[in-house]
DNA sequence: TTGATATTTCCACAATTATCGAATAATTGG
DNA sequence: CCAATTATTCGATAATTGTGGAAATATCAA
């Protein structure tokens, strides 16, 4: 299994869980400024230790970023990682056939790279 | 947790596994005509019973479709499900801000619906 | 320095997921 | 109908993942 596949599996696995999916969408909507761990815990109503586990999981997977501001740790969604993910899944869609079943989904093919 | 979230978690979980990720990409590249279970098993070098487990998993999750042709079962990728997935993840990106960090990823927002 | 705030790490336990050989089912050609 | 082909289900086992209270770590304000 190549390294790109490993990264993609980690990212997909990080998103495939109730709390983490809600968390990612929350951060997507929060935009660049992100949210503190505490604010996220309040918004999602998840115990701090559980949330911390999930946040660490997502950071390891490279789909969220973290920075410290004072006592708070601020998390934000990594949009580039998201694009790369979709690019990997749809790579070489329909073997490059022009008249593909789903041209819209297929057309996103070669625009992104997994880091 | 709403129904859309459940479907998305199942789809993401279905993709977040070594063999299933390889399988999905194989089907994406195969296009509309799809591939038989046997052909997939050969291509991926996975025991038949294991592959069957993964194929069933993916069909349940709604990211691949199945039809019978003679003795063979033909599987193909569901592109629409893929689009819906990305749409859900990026919904209301950056709270609708025009000058979003990643306009390209964000712009895919309201074009798809989870069934 | 001390006390309060913000968050993580540790740990033990529960729950889910993956593996694959053997047995079973569905389909077809002769 | 029968043998061959194609693929699934069963079942026992191994491996991974999620949970949350309690203790530890980092930061700051006074």
Image (spheres, coloured by chain):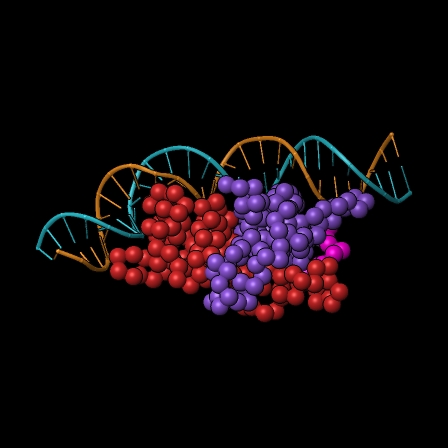
Chain colours: A purple, B red, C orange, D cyan
Q: Position of residue A16 (x, y in %)?
A: 54, 51
Residue at the farthest bottom position: B111
Above or below — where is D8 with respect to B94? above
Q: Nearer the viewer, residue B65 or B22?
A: B22
Q: Is residue A41 left or right of residue B76?
A: right
Where is residue B31, by image quadrant? bottom left
Residue at (72, 53) in percent of width and height: A35
Q: Is residue B55 left or right of residue B88?
A: left
Q: Is residue A30 magenta?
A: yes
Q: Position of residue C19 (x, y in %)?
A: 39, 39
Residue at (74, 67) in percent of width and height: B98
Residue at (62, 66) in percent of width and height: B109
Q: Is residue A3 left or right of residue C21?
A: right
Q: Position of residue B44 (x, y in %)?
A: 41, 45
Residue at (73, 66) in percent of width and height: B97
| Main SS, magenta residues | helix
Q: Position of residue A51 (x, y in %)?
A: 63, 46
Q: Is residue A48 left or right of residue B32?
A: right
Using the rendered image of the protein, determine whether residue B109 is visible from the camera's viewpoint: yes
The residues colored magenta run A29-36
Above or below — where is B63 with respect to D24? below
Q: Nearer the viewer, residue A56 or A61?
A: A61
Using the rendered image of the protein, determine whether residue A58 is visible from the camera's viewpoint: no
């Amino acid at each position: 299994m190549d390294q790109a596949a490993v990264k993609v599996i980690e990212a997909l696995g990080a998103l495939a869980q109730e709390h983490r999916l809600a968390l990612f969408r929350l951060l997507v909507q929060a935009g660049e400024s992100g949210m503190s761990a505490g604010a996220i815990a309040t918004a999602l109503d998840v115990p701090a230790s559980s949330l911390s586990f999930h946040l660490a999981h997502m950071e390891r997977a490279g789909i969220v970023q973290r920075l410290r501001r004072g006592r708070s740790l601020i998390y934000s969604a990594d949009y580039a990682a998201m694009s790369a993910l979709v690019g990997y899944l749809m790579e070489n869609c329909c073997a490059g056939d022009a008249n593909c079943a789903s041209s819209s989904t297929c057309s996103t093919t070669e625009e992104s790279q997994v880091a």
